[in-house]
Amino acid sequence: MIPDIVVATLGLGPGFRRRIHKHIALHHAISYDKKMKYIIITDLVSDFDEIRKNTDLIIDVVDIFELIDKYNIELYTEFIPKSRIEPDYSTEHASRPGEYSYNAKRFALLRLYELGITQFILLDPDHYFTYPSKETEAQFWSGLDIPTNTFAGICHEKVECKYISELEVFQLTPAACMGMESVHFYQTAPYAAHMIQQSMMNKYDIYKYSIINTQDYEQLHLFEGPVRYYNFSSKESVLEYFRVWSEAVHILSTLPRLDRLLKSGPGWMHADFAPTTLANVIMKLNIVDFPANTIQGNVFYEDRYFLPTSGGYVKTNTLKEFISVNKDKLLSDYAGSDSRMEYLTFMNDEK
């Protein structure tokens, strides 16, 4: 049986909005009749008017700030730029270096809740699906057939403490995605979960505190953020997960020493490793691995033109300028990747 799965993606700023355009156009052109449909959360809804006329793959396009206002969400210190166009978008980011909110994707859960959608994939704009042939179709969909109350992710790492009998010592294994901050996360996770639930009780009358069982935190499951797949039992669980994730962002960003957990990983963002791991434990979700052969992902540096970049790229205030200044290096670095060369922004039609 083919799961009824919806894909939710976040397109903030000109670069990521453009990448969504290109990957949806890619899927639209594929001759396959069981493609998953999209909900797009963005800062400029009108940017998707044209593509919505040309494809049936888009369920809805929603303004992230309308969702924030509608649900009266307090962002606290979380940074989501209000600017929508160049060069203001880049300039606003430059005023808050290192604070790009990778957790902003969670706002898709509010629209999913409204539509009663309980099985969905949060997918980064620079990832897309490699749909199967007739021969591999059954295998493709069986890999996405997960039970209710389950989370599936990619690049699965475990942070755990094991007793090494030969050495007669306990040894804590960190996760590469968070580095040594994962050790700090392991030490503070039960406390953070307690504070998140206390905050939830103060805000939502119907929320009931779940007793902290330290055994639940003896092994923390961390996953990379580009693909987060959920199958909830009800739309109410979707909303509750959003609230727990939001409280995790709030608690981790405001309590001393815990703010380090948001800043772990890439230096240009506030990462979602810790908030989603805590939400999964608090919501008591089953954990499985996402089938990696169903997706393709690449880092497109031109999408991130407004962020500090590594590898010798020059940061600029507009996408066009970034491509002009860095074109030779982009061509050189992408030469070994057919998929990146094929969908490189400046090699496709310009809007």
Image: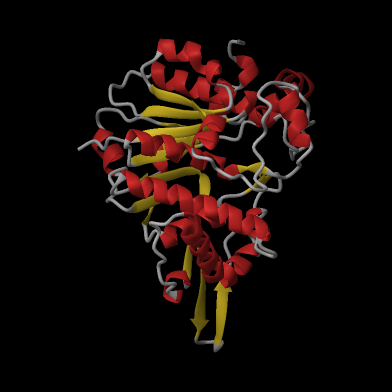
Quadrant occupied by the C terminus: top right
| Residue 293 coordinates in the image, percent (x, y) | 40, 40
Query: In the rendered image, is residue 222 in sight?
Result: no
Q: Nearer the viewer, residue 135 or 344?
A: 344
Q: Nearer the viewer, residue 40 or 248?
A: 248
| Residue 209 coordinates in the image, percent (x, y) | 42, 66
Work out which residue is located at the far left of the displayed protein and give it. 1
Q: Give the residue at x 66% y 45%.
A: 269
Q: For residue 262, which quarter of the picture? A: bottom right
Q: How is the image coloured?
A: secondary structure
In the rendered image of this protein, does residue 169 appear above or below residue 195? below
Query: In the rendered image, is residue 38 in sight?
Result: yes
In the rendered image of this protein, does residue 21 appear above or below residue 285? above
Q: For residue 256, which quarter of the picture? A: bottom right
| Residue 330 coordinates in the image, percent (x, y) | 70, 27
Q: For residue 328, which quarter of the picture? A: top right
Q: Give the residue at x 44% y 38%.
A: 110
Q: How many badges with numbers are in the image? A: 0
Q: Nearer the viewer, residue 258 or 36?
A: 258
Q: Give the residue at x 34% y 53%.
A: 150
In the rendered image of this protein, does residue 119 appear above or below residue 302? below
Q: Nearer the viewer, residue 236 or 322?
A: 236
In the rendered image of this protein, does residue 249 appear above or below residue 58? below
Quadrant occupied by the N terminus: top left
| Residue 298 coordinates in the image, percent (x, y) | 56, 34
